[in-house]
Image: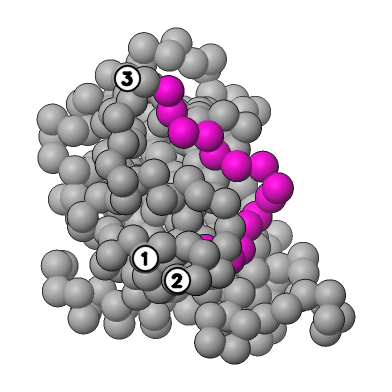
Amino acid sequence: MSDLQTQQYLFDVQGYLVVENVLDSEEVVELNERIDEQNLPTPGKVQRFGSAPDGPGFLQWGKSFCSLLDHPKIMDILRFRLGDCFRLDRIYGMYMNNGMQRGGLHADYGASSPTSKAKPGEYYPFRDNEIHNGFVVVTWNLADTGPEHGGFCCIPGSHKSNYKLPQEIAADPEKASCVIIPNAPTGSAILFSEALTHGTAAWNGKHQRRSLLYKYCVSHMAWTSRRVALPKNIELTERQKILFREPADPHRHFPSLF
């Protein structure tokens, strides 16, 4: 699926989008080899690696990780959700071995978020760029994920819900028909809004799950006061450097990425 109009429609309706064949086999091998070099502990209670802010995270592991920052096959899709001015807010990797349990369903923005009951004047939605659309995650899949394996799961369309996630679904998502695990083969990218109710399904794959998550937000917003640092001794393009800027008003104090 490469037609941008179709991608925009599906992303808007579903709250997520799977784009296949973004990375070729050589790129996937390169990224996995760089991860292997880190001698990470066996995944267990800790399912994340290479996290940032507080340093550059896995971006320091090689230029191949930095090349994903503004991959040409995702930038126009991000532009549809975030506009011309957005920044990199957080990154981390996820890895899972066979038999590892699921995580909880959640949404960082929208009706099911912790901030949904905040009083007006303490939490500001933006009419033209509402805050629940202001964060988009790009998950790069370095191994097959899907219904038979596990991995990313979500409730399609939940980013537009006006009602909080029912406890019945949250407590037992495996039995809820509304919760799906989309097929996302090796080399694909999953893009989703942080307002989408999403989570991590139990991992049943015989291979190890490996995914890299890049979290972007509109330029005038931030998740935390900490920032992802520029990697040392790795040359970045001018556009990639913009993604590390401090939060600021779009166009007036933050340049367009396009």
Tags 1 and 2 in contact by the CB under 8 Å rule?
A: yes
Q: Find residue 256 and report its horizontal and vertical position in percent.
A: 37, 65
Tags 1 and 3 in contact by the CB under 8 Å rule?
A: no
Tags 3 and 2 in contact by the CB under 8 Å rule?
A: no
Pick whichever of labels 3 and 2 is earlier in the sequence. Answer: 3
Tell which residue pokes out farthest to the front in this image.
252
Residue kind at label 2, given as amino acid type: His
Which label number is shown at residue 67? none
Res. 69 image quadrant? top left
**Neighbour tally class for label 1: few under 14, some 14-19, many 20 plus, Cα within 10 Å:** some
Q: Which residues are magenta?
A: 219-232
Q: Find residue 198 and report its horizontal and vertical position in percent.
A: 54, 61
Q: How is the image coloured?
A: one colour
Between residues 143 and 75, which one lies in front from this camera angle? 75
Residue 165 visible somewhere in the drawing: no
- What residue did someone put label 1 on? 256
- What residue did someone put label 2 on? 251
Q: Is residue 73 magenta?
A: no
SS under mark 2: loop
